[in-house]
Image (cartoon, grey):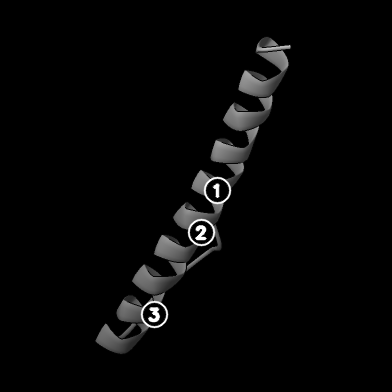
């Protein structure tokens, strides 16, 4: 997660957008790991 120090409502909104994007990227990586583990388990 990127460091954030919002000082205005606009910066706070941008921080929320950045946090959501970071969470989505993290979730995508976790999904990839789970899929890889499941594929190897099925072999």
> What is the CA distance from the residue labelled 2 to the residue labelled 3?
12 Å
> What is the CA distance from the residue labelled 3 to the residue labelled 1?
21 Å
Tell me where residue 30 appears, x and y as whole percent. Answer: 56, 37
Label 3 sits on a secondary structure element that is helix
- Badge 3 crowding class, 10 Å Cα cut-off, few under 14, some 14 to 19, many 20 or more, is some
Residue visible at 68% across and 28% down? 36
Labels 3 & 1 near each other (Cβ < 8 A): no
Q: Is residue 40 above or below residue 21?
A: above
Picture quarter containing residue 40?
top right
The residue that mark 3 highlights is 14
Of the image marks 2 and 3, the number of the one nearer the N terminus: 3
Residue visible at 37% across and 83% down? 11
- Badge 1 crowding class, 10 Å Cα cut-off, few under 14, some 14 to 19, many 20 or more, is few
Of discs 2 and 1, which sits in the foreground? 1
Label 2 sits on a secondary structure element that is helix
Q: Nearer the viewer, residue 18 or 38?
A: 38
The residue that mark 1 highlights is 28
Residue visible at 39% across and 72% down? 17
Picture quarter containing residue 5?
bottom left
Looking at the figure, which quarter contains the N terminus?
Answer: bottom right
Q: Is residue 5 above or below residue 29?
A: below
Picture quarter containing residue 7?
bottom left
The residue that mark 2 highlights is 22
Q: Nearer the viewer, residue 9 or 29?
A: 29
Q: Nearer the viewer, residue 22 or 4?
A: 22
Looking at the figure, which quarter contains the C terminus?
Answer: top right
Of discs 2 and 3, which sits in the foreground? 2
Labels 2 & 1 near each other (Cβ < 8 A): no
Label 1 sits on a secondary structure element that is helix
Q: Is residue 23 left or right of residue 12?
A: right
Residue visible at 38% across and 77% down? 6
> What is the CA distance from the residue labelled 2 to the residue labelled 1?
10 Å
């Amino acid at each position: 997660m990127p460091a954030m120090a919002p000082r205005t409502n606009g910066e706070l909104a941008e921080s929320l957008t950045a946090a959501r994007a970071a969470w989505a990227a993290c979730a995508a990586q976790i999904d990839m790991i789970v899929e890889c583990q499941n594929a190897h388990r099925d072999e």
